[in-house]
Image (cartoon, grey):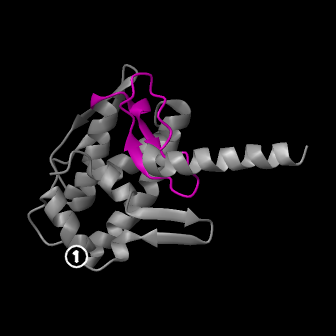
């Protein structure tokens, strides 16, 4: 299983700009790739993919909330628990306790699998390490492993270089107009 299915899911949506978004869940073979990567042991149905797409819409705002506040509000915790409960009795739950998070899990549903990976990430690690790329045309999720949690881009080679090039060109234009 992938170390962080929630990152895989958030990163199936690529935001090129305000008018152009690529949803990799729409690509042929996307479900099969996720089945293999996550080792779910069953075929992902069209309903599963639709549910994953809907849950992706919950994950990105939850990560933004973690980035802003370092924690999840009640609405985000309830949405996460609703996704975790898709497995019926004995499902996983995330709890907020003592300034941190804890997870108790038993799941078999693909959305619950993704939700459980996110719950583990915020419960077992520093939730401030989960970030979205600072490039407004990307916004992929990543885990910031830098010592001081200062990483801003999903990839310094791609988004980081694009941002640095834009800043350089902006400074050059400013100097040229003086």
The answer to whether residue 108 is above or below residue 18 is above
Q: Position of residue 44 (x, y in %)?
A: 20, 71
Displayed quadrant of residue 42? bottom left
Say whether residue 75 is visible: no
Residue for point 22% across, 64% down: 34
* Residue located at (61% from left, 49% from top): 165
Q: Quadrant of residue 174?
A: top right
Q: Residue at x 38, y 57 (%)?
A: 11
Which image quarter is the C terminus in? top right
For mark 1, give the secondary structure.
loop
Stretch of the chain drawn in magenta: 124-153
- Quarter of the view holding residue 48: bottom left
Residue 141 in picture, x, y percent from top left: 42, 48
Image x and y of residue 147, in percent: 39, 22
Residue density around tag 1, few if under 14, some if 14–19, many if 20 or more, within 10 Å: few
Q: Is residue 171 magenta?
A: no
Q: Main secondary structure of the magenta part?
A: loop
Q: Nearer the viewer, residue 84 or 128?
A: 128
Give the residue at mark 1: 45
User: Residue at (32%, 44%) from the top-left corner?
Assistant: 118
Residue 91, horizontal then vertical, whole percent: 20, 48
Residue 132 as seen in the image, left or right of residue 142: right
Question: In this orientation, does residue 98 appear?
Answer: yes
How many circles with numbers are drawn on the protein? Answer: 1
Q: Is residue 136 magenta?
A: yes
Q: Nearer the viewer, residue 117 or 88?
A: 117
Query: Which is more toward the observer, 49 or 106?
Result: 49
């Amino acid at each position: 299983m992938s170390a962080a299915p929630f990152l895989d899911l958030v990163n199936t949506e690529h935001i090129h700009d305000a008018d152009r978004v690529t949803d990799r869940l729409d690509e042929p073979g996307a479900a099969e790739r996720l089945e293999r990567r996550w080792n779910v042991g069953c075929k992902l149905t069209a309903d599963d993919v639709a549910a994953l797409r809907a849950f992706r819409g919950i994950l990105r705002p939850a990560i933004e909330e973690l980035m802003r506040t370092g924690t999840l509000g009640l609405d985000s915790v309830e949405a996460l628990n609703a996704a975790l409960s898709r497995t019926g009795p004995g499902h996983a739950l995330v709890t907020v306790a003592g300034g941190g998070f804890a997870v108790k899990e038993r799941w078999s549903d693909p959305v619950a699998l993704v939700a459980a990976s996110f719950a583990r990430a915020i419960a077992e690690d520093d939730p401030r390490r989960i970030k979205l790329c600072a490039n407004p045309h990307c916004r992929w999720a990543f885990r910031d492993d830098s010592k001081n949690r200062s990483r801003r881009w999903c990839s310094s080679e791609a988004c980081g270089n694009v941002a640095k090039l834009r800043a350089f060109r902006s400074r050059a234009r400013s100097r040229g107009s003086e």
